[in-house]
Image (cartoon, rainbow, N blue to C red):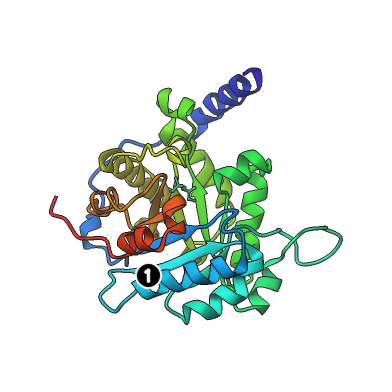
Amino acid sequence: MKVAASILAAVIASASSFVVQPQNTRRDTFLSARKPFITGNWKLNPTTKKEAIELATGIANAVSDSSPGDVALFIPYPFLESVESAVDGKVTIGAEFITAEESGAFTGGVSPLMLKSMGIEWALAGHSERRTLNGESDEEINEQCLMLIENGMNVVLCIGETLEEFEKGLVDSVCAIQLKKNLAGVTPEQMKQVTIAYEPVWAIGTGKVATPEIAQDVHKVCRDIIADMYDETVADECRILYGGSVSPESVDGLMAKPDIDGTLVGGASLDDSKFGRIINFETVEE
Ligand code: 13P
């Protein structure tokens, strides 16, 4: 508890230097042409290569010409090559994390150069499970983003607040801190290689999906922060995904919101019929 309290105190202290400016009507996000992007994160699943190929094949079969967006799966390293060939180009395959080194004495590491040599061009960075379970700092996540980008790859940068931060009204500040620290040194041109995933930690694996209204508000704040860091064009073109207990029941309402450009799905991406329904979300009137 003491550690949590001191982390929170540090967030509050540093939040003051990342004040989010009041929002205005500076852009009409409805005019943007951001193609929907439905993505899954398998985490430490499934157990065998056979299951991985079957699951990926089922998911690829759900993708058709009438599917509304791009589809990607972030999966464990051992399955990358066999799943990549199983999906036959219908689904982009990426890694769940990288080591921010090109080579050397880093036991257990996997560099972007290794992935690139296998035809893998996407990876996640900054997932909350890696921030907490693996102790990855904002600075390390920044190095991973830069390493991926500088090697011509694409990154889905995951950000989001804990329940305690949510309850204390720190969502905007936490997102601002993470975006500014994790994207330090990334140029406006390089932002074309960046997708943001807003994943409130309290919604991950809990079944407590953020309401479309809450998620929309935070996505809009994130887009405004990106506009302040870069410019309106970069902010308008950047896809911002929502992650946290997305299901076939919740996807349509989330995707109806103007600043929600896609999803990063955990549990439901392990079920091809559920994920297939999410891929083929239905457009609902607001
Ligand atoms: P769940 O969809 O299982 O909540 O996981 C979300 C997530 O962490 C995706 O990266």
Is 221 drawn above or below residue 188 in the view shown?
above
Residue at (45% x, 44% y) in the render:
199
Q: Specify the farthest residue to the top.
A: 2
Is 124 drawn above or below residue 49 in the view shown?
above
Left or right of 284? Residue 200 is right
- In the picture, residue 80 is in which quadrant? bottom right
Tally the marks: 1
Q: Position of residue 153 (x, y in %)?
A: 57, 70
Is residue 19 visible in this depiction of the protein?
A: no
Q: Nearer the viewer, residue 96 or 125?
A: 96
Mark 1: give few (<14), some (14-19) or many (20+) Cα within 10 Å: some
Residue at (62% x, 64% y) in the render:
48
Residue at (50% x, 66% y) in the render:
193
Q: Specify the farthest residue to the right.
A: 105
Question: Where, quadrant-wise, is the N terminus in this rendering?
Answer: top right
Instruction: Judge: label 1 CB < 8 Å from ligand 1.
Output: no
- In the picture, residue 2 is in which quadrant? top right
Residue at (60% x, 79% y) in the render:
119
- In the picture, residue 84 is in which quadrant? bottom right
Is 56 drawn above or below residue 219 in the view shown?
below
Q: Position of residue 44 (x, y in %)?
A: 60, 53
Q: Amino acid at mark 1?
A: Asp
Q: Position of residue 3 (x, y in %)?
A: 65, 22
Is residue 211 visible in this depiction of the protein?
A: yes
Q: Secondary structure at mark 1?
A: strand
Left or right of 26? Residue 52 is right
Q: Position of residue 181 (x, y in %)?
A: 57, 45
Location of mark 1 (residue): 70
